[in-house]
Image (spheres, rainbow, N blue to C red):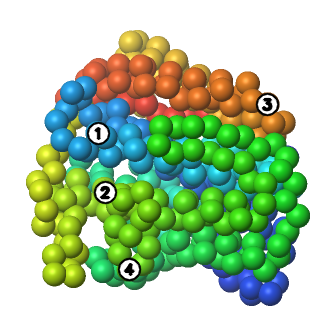
Amino acid sequence: MDQPSPDTRIPELLAVRAEQRNLAWMKRSLQVAVEVELATLPPYLCGSWSCKQGSAGIAPLVLRTVIRQEMVHLGLAANLLTTIGGTPAINAAAPTYPGPLPGGLRPDVTVYLGGLTKEYIADVCMPIEYPDSGPLTVPSPGHTLGRFYDAIDATLTALNPAITGQNQHTANLGADRVFGIGDLTAAHEAIKIMKDQGEGTTTAPGDLPFGDHPHYYRFAEIHNGAALEQVDGVWGFTGEPVEFPEVLPMAVVPPGGWPRPTAEASTLLRQFNDIYTSLLDNLQAAWETGDREALDSALGDMFALEGPAVALMGIPLPGGRGNYGPEFIYRV
């Protein structure tokens, strides 16, 4: 197995001169991509689960769409790594919250777990998806995911590595799908999807073939309370009102998880973390061995997380500081 290295950081990878980027560089980079895509899921899931059932407006739908696409991105990143002869390290790369994004991406950002609020969107969701540049943002102070994926894409072209097609998985997730990487064209298409759906293009927020805005702008619509539109060539959040959903008051999960939880919360936390551990172990087995049953089990685990998570969000913390929520702790 290609174990993740804590020393593998995006700034150092991007500092390697283009002509010196070899197959080992590509494998290390795609491992970091797997880790980044994996790390986005827990905070987005917490935001989605905290929306009360039946909440009005588009926000719950936006969150579910983003989560589905991030699951696809994780699968595509894993397929990209296995098809060039690598093996993703997934359970060994379980993220810790609160904490930084993997690979030194956006070092100014601390990702934490909490219920959906405008502050949570501004602190966590939008920074993860921040564009390289564009009509509504200033240049990022650190490396963005888009720049990283551009470098991987260019190196694929330069190296033209052997595409083995080993341990590939496919999955249809609503309107999006994980597809196998059998040639260089499919590899480039996978990277384009991962970039465009996330941070998007640098010029037009809506310039996508599926007619949807990238994740950054969808989160920004919820944060700004208005739809993104273009008027006289100028993009702005001046469209139809975007209603903020009713949410369960999940508090921010402290480092190491909830201290001294109540008996009811403790049972649910244990149940949730056991399912989460099974999810990561099944994802590991799926891409380590090509086991389709393991991937199917992982998808079942993903849906099974919601029950205990929502139940936790209904249990008040002692002292009226909000409610419990899932910790996403991997049990080694």
* Relative side of 286 to 71, left or right: right
Within 10 Å of disc 1 (Cα), the crowding (few <14, some 14-19, many 20+) is many
The label on residue 180 is none
Q: Earlier in the sequence, mark 2 or mark 3?
A: 2
The residue drawn where x is 34% and y is 70% is: 205
Q: On the image, numbered disc 1 is attached to which residue? A: 60
- Are dots 2 and 3 in contact, CB under 8 Å? no
The residue drawn where x is 84% and y is 59% is: 163
Within 10 Å of disc 3 (Cα), the crowding (few <14, some 14-19, many 20+) is some
- Calculate the distance from the C-alpha at mark 2 to the C-alpha at mark 1: 11 Å
Q: On the image, numbered disc 3 is attached to which residue? A: 291
- Are dots 4 and 2 in contact, CB under 8 Å? no
Task: Name which residue type carries label 4.
Answer: Thr
Task: Name which residue type carries label 2.
Answer: Arg
- Are dots 2 and 1 in contact, CB under 8 Å? no
Q: Earlier in the sequence, mark 2 or mark 1?
A: 1
Q: On the image, numbered disc 4 is attached to which residue? A: 203
Q: Earlier in the sequence, mark 1 or mark 4?
A: 1
Q: Earlier in the sequence, mark 3 or mark 1?
A: 1
- Calculate the distance from the C-alpha at mark 3 to the C-alpha at mark 1: 33 Å
* Relative side of 94 to 243, left or right: right
Q: On the image, numbered disc 2 is attached to which residue? A: 218
Frontmost of labels 1 and 4 is 4
Task: Name which residue type carries label 3.
Answer: Asp
Q: Earlier in the sequence, mark 4 or mark 3?
A: 4
- Calculate the distance from the C-alpha at mark 2 to the C-alpha at mark 3: 35 Å
User: Where does residue 281 sit, x and y in percent of width and height?
Assistant: 70, 31
The residue drawn where x is 12% and y is 66% is: 238
The answer to which of 264 and 188 lies nearer the viewer is: 188
Residue 323 sits in quarter: top left
- Calculate the distance from the C-alpha at mark 4 to the C-alpha at mark 3: 41 Å
